[in-house]
Image (spheres, coloured by chain):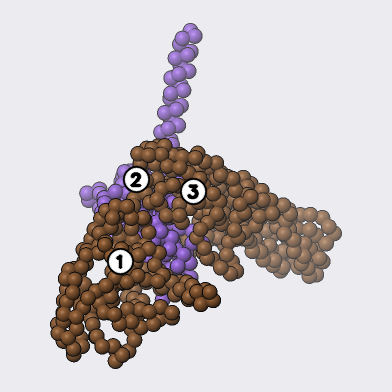
C-alpha cells in the first residue's frame, strides 16, 4: 500500500515536472531556441541495440473519426544486425492510452544491418466514439528499458500523443470577468451562451474551480467565498438558441484587495472539458476612505511659507472597471496650532506622463506602432501653499478620491 | 395660426437637432507645425478628418495634428479621441502628407480609442484559448492589465485576413515577458498567438 502511495507521489511529481517543462518550452519556442525536454537514455555501452530514431516524439490533434499518417526513421548505429518488432506500450502517467487497433504500422517488422535505416509509416485512426482527451502511448522498437524513478522506460521508442477534441457545441461568449468593485456593492455579470447544435444541452452552473495551484504564497488574490456569489441560470439551452447565466457577486463590506473565483458552467457538452467551461472572476475591491489621512508636523519659528504637495503616480489603465472613476483629486485640510481648520485651494496642478515609444518587444502585428507614443503612467500632483504659517504643531489631513494610493510632501521655508 | 406655430416649432426643432448633430459629428481639429506654410496646414486641417479611421460606431471628438517638415513632404503625428463617454484611450496615427498631391499616406498607427465593452469583449475572446491562459499562468502575466489595440486590415492581411482585428497584449515591464493574442472580433476567435519570455 505504502509502495503504491509512493509510486503515485513519484508519478505526480514526474508529471508535474514534465508539465512545467512542456509549458515553458511552448512559451519559449516561439522566440527563443531552447533544448526540448528529452529523457536521458542510459549510457550506450549498456545497450546492445544502438538506434537512431527520428522523431522521438510526435503529437497530433485529431477529431473522432479522423486519421493521420506520419513517418518515423530508424537507423541501426550499432555493429550488429537487429530485428525491429515495434510494439505499443502504455505510459504509466497518461490520461488515456492509444489503443493498438487505432494504429497501423508499415512495415510491421524490419531487419537492419549495421548502418542501415528504415522508414516506418504510422497511421493513427481515431474511432468515432472516442472520448475527448489526451491520449499517449509509446511505440517501442526494442525491448530494452532503463528505469527512471519507479518507471521502466523504453530506450528505443517513439512517444506518441494525440489530443482528441471536438468543436464545442456550446459557445461560451465570456469566460473572464475582471472588474473593480466597491466593498459592500452588488455586481451582476451576464455570461451569454449559444447552443450551435441540434439538440438541447443541459446546464448546471456551480461556484468553484477545478483548476488548482494558480497562485501560491504572498501577494496572491483571495478566493471569493461561495456565499457571496449567486448564480441564475436556465437548466438547458435549446438547440440553436442562446441563454444567459447571470452571476451576482455581493461583496462584503469588509472586503479588501483582489479576489478571484470561478463558476463552472456545468455544460453537458462532452467536447468542452470540465476545466474549460469555467468563468473566471477577478475582482479588485476599491474602498473609498471615509476619514481623511492625518499627519502631524511642526512649523519652526520664523517660517514664511508652507507648501504641501499631494499626488499619485498611476498606470494609464487603472480606471478600468464598474466604478467609473475620474481623475484623482485630493481635499487637503490644515489644522493650525490653535486648532482652526484651513482648507487651502490648490495653487498648482501638475500632470506628468510616462510615454512609451514602443521600443520594447512588440508582437508582429503591433509593429506598425513602433516608435509611437503610448501613455503608460500618469502622475497627478497638486500643490497647496500657505503663507506665513504660525509656528507650532500642525496637522495635515488628506482625503483622496479616485486614487488607490497617494504621496505627499510637506515643505516649510 | 396654430398650424403655422406648430410648423414653425417643428422646423425649429429639426434645425436645432441638425445643428446639434452637425456639431457632434464635426471633430475639433487643431493643426500645429513650425515652418510649414499656412496653405499646407489649412489643407491638412481640411483633409485629416477623411484620412483617419475611427472604429465603426465611434466619431472622433478631437483630432490634434503635429506637423513636421520632412524633405518635400510633411510628417504628421495625429492624436484622435472620441468623447470619453463613447470610448477611452487614444488613437495615434503617423502620416506622410504630400502637399503636391494633397494625399495622406498612413505610415504607422497605434489605435486604442475603443469603448470599454469592446476591449472587454476582445479580452474575453482571447481568454477562451487554453494555450493563452497557460502562457499567462506560466509567465506570471495574469495580474497584468492587457492592452487592446485595433489592427487595420492592411496589417491583418499578413497574419490572417484583411479585416479589422484586435491585438490583446499582456506585458510585464519588469520581467520583459509579453504575450499577445490576435483576435477576430467578428468570428469571436483567437487567430494568432505570440509570446516572448525573458531568459
Q: Residue A294 is drawn in which quadrant?
A: bottom right
Q: What element carries label 2?
A: loop
Q: Which of marks 3 and 1 is nearer the N terminus?
A: 1
Answer above or below: position of B43 versus A361. above
Give the color of chain B as drawn. purple
Q: Where is residue B153 in the image (x, y as percent from the top left)?
A: 28, 50
Do marks 3 and 1 share a subunit? yes
Which chain, by letter, is brown?
Answer: A
- Which residue does the numbered mark 1 point to in the structure image? A59
Direction top: furthest residue? B1
Observer-side mark, 2 or 1, equals: 1
* Res. A399 image quadrant: bottom right
Looking at the image, can residue A257 be seen? yes
For mark 3, give the secondary structure.
loop
Q: How crowded is mark 3: few (under 14 residues within 10 Å), some or many (20 or more)?
A: many
- Residue that appears at 50% across and 54% down: A280
Mark 3 to mark 1: distance in Å?
Answer: 30 Å
Q: Which residue is drawn at 34% across and 86% down?
A: A42
Amino acid at each position: 500500500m505504502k509502495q503504491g502511495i509512493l509510486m503515485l507521489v513519484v508519478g505526480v511529481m514526474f508529471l508535474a515536472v514534465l508539465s512545467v517543462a512542456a509549458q515553458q518550452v511552448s512559451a519559449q519556442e516561439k522566440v527563443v531556441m531552447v533544448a526540448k525536454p528529452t529523457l536521458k537514455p542510459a549510457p550506450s555501452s549498456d545497450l546492445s541495440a544502438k538506434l537512431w530514431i527520428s522523431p522521438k516524439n510526435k503529437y497530433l490533434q485529431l477529431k473522432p473519426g479522423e486519421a493521420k499518417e506520419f513517418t518515423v526513421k530508424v537507423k541501426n548505429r550499432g555493429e550488429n544486425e537487429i530485428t525491429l518488432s515495434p510494439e505499443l506500450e502504455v505510459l504509466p502517467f497518461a490520461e488515456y492510452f492509444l489503443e493498438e487497433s487505432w494504429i497501423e504500422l508499415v512495415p510491421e517488422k524490419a531487419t537492419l544491418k549495421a548502418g542501415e535505416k528504415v522508414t516506418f509509416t504510422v497511421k493513427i485512426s481515431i474511432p468515432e466514439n472516442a472520448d475527448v482527451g489526451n491520449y499517449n502511448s509509446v511505440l517501442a522498437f526494442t525491448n530494452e528499458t532503463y528505469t527512471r524513478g519507479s518507471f521502466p522506460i523504453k530506450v528505443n521508442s517513439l512517444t506518441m500523443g494525440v489530443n482528441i477534441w471536438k468543436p464545442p457545441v456550446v459557445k461560451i461568449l465570456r469566460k473572464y470577468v475582471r472588474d473593480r468593485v466597491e466593498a459592500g456593492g452588488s455586481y451582476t455579470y451576464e455570461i451569454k451562451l449559444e447552443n450551435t447544435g441540434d439538440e438541447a444541452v443541459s446546464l448546471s452552473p456551480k461556484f468553484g474551480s477545478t483548476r488548482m495551484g494558480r497562485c501560491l504564497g504572498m501577494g496572491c488574490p483571495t478566493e471569493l467565498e461561495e456565499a457571496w456569489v449567486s448564480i441564475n441560470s436556465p437548466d438547458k439551452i435549446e438547440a440553436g438558441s442562446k441563454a444567459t447565466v447571470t452571476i451576482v457577486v455581493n461583496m462584503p463590506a469588509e472586503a479588501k484587495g483582489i479576489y478571484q473565483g470561478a463558476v463552472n458552467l456545468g455544460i453537458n457538452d462532452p467536447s468542452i472539458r470540465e476545466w474549460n467551461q469555467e468563468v473566471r472572476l477577478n475582482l479588485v475591491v476599491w474602498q473609498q476612505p471615509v476619514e481623511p489621512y492625518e499627519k502631524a508636523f511642526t512649523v519652526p519659528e520664523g517660517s514664511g511659507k508652507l507648501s504641501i504637495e499631494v499626488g499619485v503616480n498611476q498606470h494609464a489603465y487603472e480606471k478600468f472597471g464598474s466604478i467609473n472613476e475620474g481623475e484623482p483629486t485630493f481635499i487637503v485640510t490644515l489644522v493650525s496650532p490653535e486648532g482652526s481648520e484651513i482648507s487651502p485651494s490648490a495653487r498648482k496642478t501638475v500632470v506628468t506622463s510616462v510615454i512609451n515609444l514602443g521600443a520594447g518587444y512588440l508582437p508582429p502585428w503591433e509593429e506598425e506602432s513602433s516608435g509611437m507614443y503610448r501613455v503608460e503612467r500618469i502622475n497627478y500632483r497638486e500643490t497647496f501653499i500657505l503663507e506665513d504659517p504660525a509656528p507650532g504643531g500642525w496637522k495635515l489631513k488628506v482625503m483622496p478620491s479616485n486614487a488607490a494610493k497617494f504621496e505627499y510632501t510637506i515643505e516649510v521655508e | 395660426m396654430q398650424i403655422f406655430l406648430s410648423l414653425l416649432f417643428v422646423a425649429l426643432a429639426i434645425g436645432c437637432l441638425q445643428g446639434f448633430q452637425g456639431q457632434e459629428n464635426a471633430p475639433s481639429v487643431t493643426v500645429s507645425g513650425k515652418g510649414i506654410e499656412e496653405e499646407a496646414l489649412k489643407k491638412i486641417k481640411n483633409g485629416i478628418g477623411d484620412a483617419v479611421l475611427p472604429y465603426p460606431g465611434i466619431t472622433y471628438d478631437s483630432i490634434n495634428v503635429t506637423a513636421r517638415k520632412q524633405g518635400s513632404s510633411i510628417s504628421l503625428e495625429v492624436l484622435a479621441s472620441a468623447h470619453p463617454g463613447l470610448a477611452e484611450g487614444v488613437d495615434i496615427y503617423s502620416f506622410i502628407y504630400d502637399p503636391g498631391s494633397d494625399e495622406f499616406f498612413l505610415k504607422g498607427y497605434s489605435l486604442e480609442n475603443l469603448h470599454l465593452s469592446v476591449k472587454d469583449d476582445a479580452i474575453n475572446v482571447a481568454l477562451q484559448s487554453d494555450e493563452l491562459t497557460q502562457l499567462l499562468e506560466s509567465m506570471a502575466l495574469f495580474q497584468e492589465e492587457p492592452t487592446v489595440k485595433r489592427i487595420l486590415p492592411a496589417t491583418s492581411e499578413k497574419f490572417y485576413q484583411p479585416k479589422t482585428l484586435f491585438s490583446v497584449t499582456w506585458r510585464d515591464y519588469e520581467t520583459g515577458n509579453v504575450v499577445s493574442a490576435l483576435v477576430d472580433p467578428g468570428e469571436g476567435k483567437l487567430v494568432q498567438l505570440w509570446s516572448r519570455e525573458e531568459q
